[in-house]
Structures are given as C-alpha cells and as structure tokens.
Amino acid sequence: MSGVGAWIRYGDPISTEQLTFAASHYRAAILQPWELEAATELKRLRPDMTMLCYKCLSSTRDYEPGPVYTSGVTHQEALDEGGSWFAKRLDNTRIQWSGYPGHWQMNVRDVQYRKRWVENVTAELADSPFDGVMADNDVFEDYYQLDLPIQGAASMADLREGLDLLVHAAGQSLNKINKILVPNIAESRRIPGRWASHAAYGGGFEEVWLGYGPSNLFDPRTAEAQLPQANGPGLSILRVPTDGSDQHPNFKYGLAAFWIFSSGRGSFTATAHDDYSRTQHIPELDWDLGGPVEQPQGRGHVWSREFSEGWAAVNFNDDGRRRRRIKVPSGLYDAAGNPAPSSVVLVPQHGVIYQGRAKKPVGAFPALSRQSPWRTFSVPPDTGCQG
C-alpha cells in the first residue's frame, strides 16, 4: 500500500472486486459524485487515500437523472434561471459540445452562474466521504468547437478569465469546510504561474502528462516545460496517455519521469482516452523508491535520479537517433526480480525504473522549478511550447 497510483474511475459502475483492488494499489481516486458507497468503502479500507469526486466547471449534461450530478449547476437549474447561464452563439442559440451529445456549454463569465456553482458544490461536499473535488474542463483552448466569438466572449482568453474566477471562488469555499479542489488544468505550461495558481487549493490534475495521445508525445522542450507540475502545490495527479494496454511503453515512461521530478509526491496513472472504467496497473506502480539520494541528473534531455531504494531514468528526446547508454547503480532489480543490468540503452520517449537497494536519503531537495540553483540543465520556459 505504499505505491503512487491514481485511479481515475468515472466510467461504468464500480464492482466490489475493483474496490478491493483499488484499496491495495492506489494512493488517490477520482470517482463520479454519486459513488458515495464506493467512496465510503474505500475510505474504510484506506483512510489515507485521497478521494475526489468529479465535477465539471464548464458544462451541464441534459441526460443525467439526478439527484447527484456531474456538474456544479444542473441542466434544469440553468433552465429555471431563464437560460441566461447557458453560453450562446451570436445567433442566440445554445452551444452543445461537439463529440459530447447532451453537454451544454455554460457562461462561466456570468457572476450568478459561478456563485451558484460554488454554493451547490460546497453544500454537497460538506458531509461527504469525498476529500474534495476534481474540477474538470478548466480549459485553455476551444476543445469542443464553441467557434468563438460567442455572446460575451470574443476569445478563449475571456472564457479562461471566467474560469479563473470560478476556480478561486470554489477553492476558497471548499477549503473553508476542509475540502480540497483539484482542477484539471489544461495546458498550464503555456501561461507562467497558471498551474500554481489553480492548484493552490489542494492540487492539480494534468490529463496529458508528456503527450496528447499514445503516439502523439511531446517534443523534449514541451515535456520539460511540464516538469514543475510534478511538485505541486498540493496533490499533483499526472496521467500519461496509452492505447489502453498496461504493457504500453508510455506507462513506464511517465512513471519514471514522475519519480525523477516529484520524488514520489503526488499520484500517477496511465490510461487510454476516456478509458476510465478499469484498474490500470503495473507492478512498478506499487513501488516506493524511498527518498532521493541525489538531484535529478540530466544531459541532452535524458534524465535519471537515484533514490534510497531505487533508480529511474527517462529519455525525452523524440528523435529516434538520440539513444543514450546510462549506467545503472548496482544492487537493483526489475519487476520480475531479475538483477538490473549495469547499464541500459534508453531509446527516445522511454523510461526505466528499478528498485532494491536501501541507501540513506540525502536530506530534502528544493522544489523543481526553472530557478532551482542546483539544476545543471535548465528547463525551458513554459510559454509557446505546444507540443
């Protein structure tokens, strides 16, 4: 029960077998808000697990029967207010998300919409087994073909301004009742300070850690622009994209990067797109590599780090010719119990992780940032790197 796994589980109904498995293999979980019995049982089995319920910041869903909803404001509630809380095109029609039938864009710039969202979610969480909220769709770009300009918003910058206000209001309100807010902070690397600001109320969720898809991984500069997110503030939940197979190489790629740059803080997962009904797992997800015994070691976008009970390395390069042979500390083992080799040739966009030897950690290291004085190879600025 000492691993770093995150369970993103807001798909099909949860089985008893999945709950038992989750209690043994995950550090954090994101469930649908109506999964109160599951959340209660997981808290009984694992009081230390961080339990978050899903809530959407930006939409209502017209197909949900209630009485618990995935949105902070229900569809009927928005209709009862005369429709002014719905986002509208210039021809005055409401906006349904492309690819997501029944999802309706809300006017996040409306003061009363934001106020009701905060009131509803705070009241719902007050006596809940959930530790807080994962607030989805803290968007950056137009992912749902809103086709701006729309009424009251000339650009995505206008919608982001409304979401900024909603995130801060919701975070402050939830913190007052000892709950946390963990937004799904889209593309935070593109605006300096966006991650730290939106994660200030309990943490942040990065849904595209190191890439948009299993075969659409970020170039090394873009990947490295994400690295400060691994250090919080609060609980950082990082998801790397795969094709749905736990054997996909991105699983170890993301996990190795997670360990090197977070020292095991936060939580990590690897899933396919919207693949949120399974219990994704590899043995290495359960490992505790201990404390760091050195700073991250990097050259040419290839990084490694030794811990008191393990070692990890990652190659962020996207050029197939940029392989790198790296020396592996002695006395380590792979997941099958085989001795680790004395060195590995790490191909681009892959990672390795070994465990085994106990070695005393060397104190605490400063949080990862572009200003960290010990960094030999600096992380590039997180502006303009869009992968």
Image (cartoon, grey):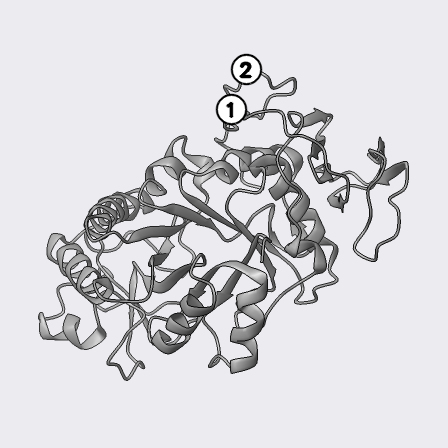
Question: Callout 2: helix, strand or loop?
Answer: loop
10 Å crowding of disc 1: few (<14), some (14-19), many (20+): few
Circle 1: residue type:
Pro
From this view, report whether residue 198 is shown above or below residue 365: below
Question: Callout 1: helix, strand or loop?
Answer: loop
Apparent side of residue 269 relative to residue 136 in the rendered image (left or right): right
Residue 380 locus on image (x, y percent): 56, 25
Which sits earlier in the primary sequence, circle 1 or circle 2?
Answer: 1
Q: Which residue is mark 1?
A: 366
Residue 232 locus on image (x, y percent): 44, 39
Circle 2: residue type:
Pro
Residue at 13% x, 55% y is 115
The residue nearer to you, when weighing 288 against 73, is: 288
Q: Quadrant of the N terminus?
A: bottom right
Q: Quadrant of the C terminus?
A: top right
Which quadrant of the structure image shows residue 319? top right
Q: Kindly tell me whether residue 365 is visible in this rendering.
A: yes
Residue at 59% x, 17% y is 374
Residue at 31% x, 82% y is 63
From this view, report whether residue 67 is shown above or below residue 258: below
Q: Which residue is mark 2?
A: 373
Q: Are marks 1 and 2 in contact (CB under 8 Å)?
A: yes
Q: Total of numbered circles in the picture? A: 2
